[in-house]
Structures are given as structure tokens and as C-alpha cells.
Amino acid sequence: MSSTKRNFLSLLDCSPEELSHLVERAKTLKQNRDWEFRPLRGRTAVLILALHSTRTRVAFETGMNQLGGHTIVLNADDTQLGRGEPIEDTARVLSEMVDIAIIRTLNQEDMESLAASASIPVINAMSSQLHPCQLLADVQTFEELRGPIGGRTVAFVGDGYNMCNSYINAARQWGFNLKIASPSGYEPSPEMVASTDNATLVESPREAVEGADLVVTDVWSSMGHEAQAEQRRAIFAPYQVNEALLDHAPEQTLFMHCLPAHRGEEISPTLLEDPRSAVWQEAGNRLHSQKALLEFLLAEQ
Ligand code: CP
């Protein structure tokens, strides 16, 4: 068991200085085409997926491979977890064999139990509460295009769910101002909003984007909310991010979305191709930022 193991379940598991280091390191790794750089040679990651994933999975698998390591992907239902083996026992077994566990689940308790029982680092690859890996890529993308995010203004428009919560943590850690516009009843929890002076609820999407250097949204029905999709479509309709809404933001504003996107719902059909959209660079940066995170947890601690 390593006495220095670190988890990355939340952006709050790192100091602001460590987060800045991760973003800078991701930018460096992005430029690094030296395939002989293999600091994770012989190391193995297990990726436990209880939910679908494209970007997160491909980024972790490709990243481990490029750094010299190896990944085993476990569909949670195909493992003994799906037949009732306790997550605490799974954590202890994995700790005997592999170097890091990465988990995507809506069951926050499972994720925390895995991290508490494992002697290896555990990464949150998205939970019902947070998606910290996405924020590493988002901040990297903003800073590549517009410089330091500290002191800037970000608008989050839409569901006060895991992406919104992660932006609240990011506002706290990187020191930017976050304006959140969510329909009534779909705001982030009062405790999350109160966790930092940098996050404010505003009345309308237009109020959120005015003065914003970055505008962000997410799907209206995240994984786990599919049964509410029809009801949510009606409630969230005034919160669509489209070209007309972005026109109320400064000319230099950027638009980001963690993807996958539902064109015609949370965004207009053409927004991803708008010159203000940085979504493809943002998606690509999942690879570089997750490589920086793997290196940080496995080679630098
Ligand atoms: N943004 C994101 O996490 O994408 P995936 O669900 O495809 O991993």
C-alpha cells in the first residue's frame, strides 16, 4: 500500500497550484510527440464503467497507452460487481493487481467506498455529482485560446447537475466568476452555490452571458434522467444556448460543451460549428489533460 496515494474524485482534491500544474503539463504533453517518453511503462489502469462513455474512455485508454501503460476496461455489469460483490472487496482486490482505478458511476457512495478501500489512486470519471476530468480539459482549452482563466467571467446555462457543480468547484479553485442560469427547481444545491463567493445564480440566460468570456452548457437530461426527458424539454426550452444568446456576450466569448450534444435542444442545430465554439479542441484536450492527471497520480506522487 502506498502511503502517498492521492485520489481525484473532485477538483477540491488538488490545490489550486496543483491544478495549474496539471493544465500546464497537459499543454506540454500536447506538444510532446516523443513516443519514447513512457513514464508509465508496466503500469495498469482499470476503468470501471457503469455508464456509457466515448471521450473519457478513449482519452484514458489512449493516454495510458501513449505513456507506456495499459488499461483494462470493465463494464461494471460484466464483473462480479454486477453479481453483488461488495465494492470494498473489489477495491482491495484491484489494489493487489493494478496501479490505478478509474470509475464512472451515478452511485456516489460506491465511488467513495472504492476510494476509501483502495490503496491505489481512484479517479472520478464522472459521477452524479461531479465531472472533474472534464474541467481540466475545459480550463486548458480556455487558457490556450484566451489566456489565464483566473479573474474572468464564465456563464453556465442549463441543468444545475454534475457539470454545473464542477464549474462551481473550478470557479473556487481557479478564481473566476461563475454566473449560473438554471430553470427553477433545477439549480445546483444551495450548499454548492454557497461553497464559494465566486458563484452566483442569475435570473436568465441573457443575464448570465452578458460580460461572459466563456459560455457553457450541458444536456438537459443527463444519464440517469432519461425518463424525465420530455418534461425537461419543455422546462429547459428557454435555456437553449444559440447564436442569438451568444450575441449578448462580448465578441471574444467562447462556447464550450462537454459533449455529447443534442442539437436542437440545449444548443441550436448550428452552434457547434459557430466560430465562437471551441468544442472540438475541448474534446481533444480530454486526452492531454487526462495524461497529465495519470502522470501526476502515478509518476509524480
Ligand atoms: N464529456 C464526456 O465525459 O464524454 P463521454 O461521456 O463520451 O465520456
Image: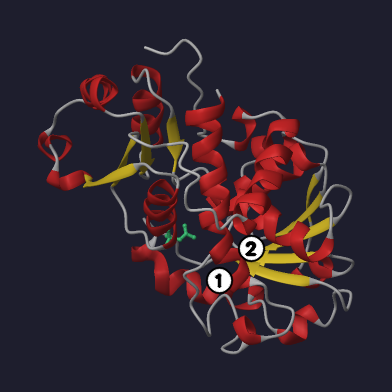
Q: Are marks 1 and 2 in contact (CB under 8 Å)?
A: yes
Identify the residue at horizontal 56%, vertical 33% (top origin): 296
Q: Is mark 2 within 8 Å of ligand 1?
A: no
**Horizontal side of residue 29 vs 227, given as left or right:** right
Q: Position of residue 152 (x, y in %)?
A: 87, 54
Q: Is mark 1 within 8 Å of ligand 1?
A: no
Q: Position of residue 72 (x, y in %)?
A: 25, 44
Q: Is residue 223 above or below residue 70?
A: below
Q: Which residue is mark 2?
A: 183
The amino acid type of the residue labelled 2 equals Pro
**Whole-number angstrom distance, CA of label 1 to CA of label 2:** 7 Å
Determine the image quadrant of residue 160: bottom right
Determine the image quadrant of residue 156: bottom right
**Horizontal side of residue 7 vs 163, given as left or right:** left
Q: Label 2 crowding class (10 Å Cα cut-off): few <14, some 14-19, many 20+?
A: many
**Horizontal side of residue 273 vs 34, given as left or right:** right
Which one is nearer the viewer's eye here, 137 or 294? 294
> How many numbered marks does the figure carry?
2
> For numbered disc 1, what is the local secondary structure?
helix
Which one is nearer the viewer's eye here, 148 or 199? 148
> For numbered disc 2, what is the local secondary structure?
loop
Label annotation for residue 235: 1
Which one is nearer the viewer's eye here, 93 or 159? 93
Quadrant assignment for ligand 1: bottom left
Res. 182 in view: yes
Res. 168 in view: no
The amino acid type of the residue labelled 1 equals Ile
Identify the residue at horizontal 77%, vertical 79% (top origin): 246
Q: Position of residue 281 (x, y in %)?
A: 62, 69
State how the image is colored.
secondary structure
Quadrant where the C terminus is found in the figure: top right
Q: Position of residue 202 (x, y in %)?
A: 79, 58
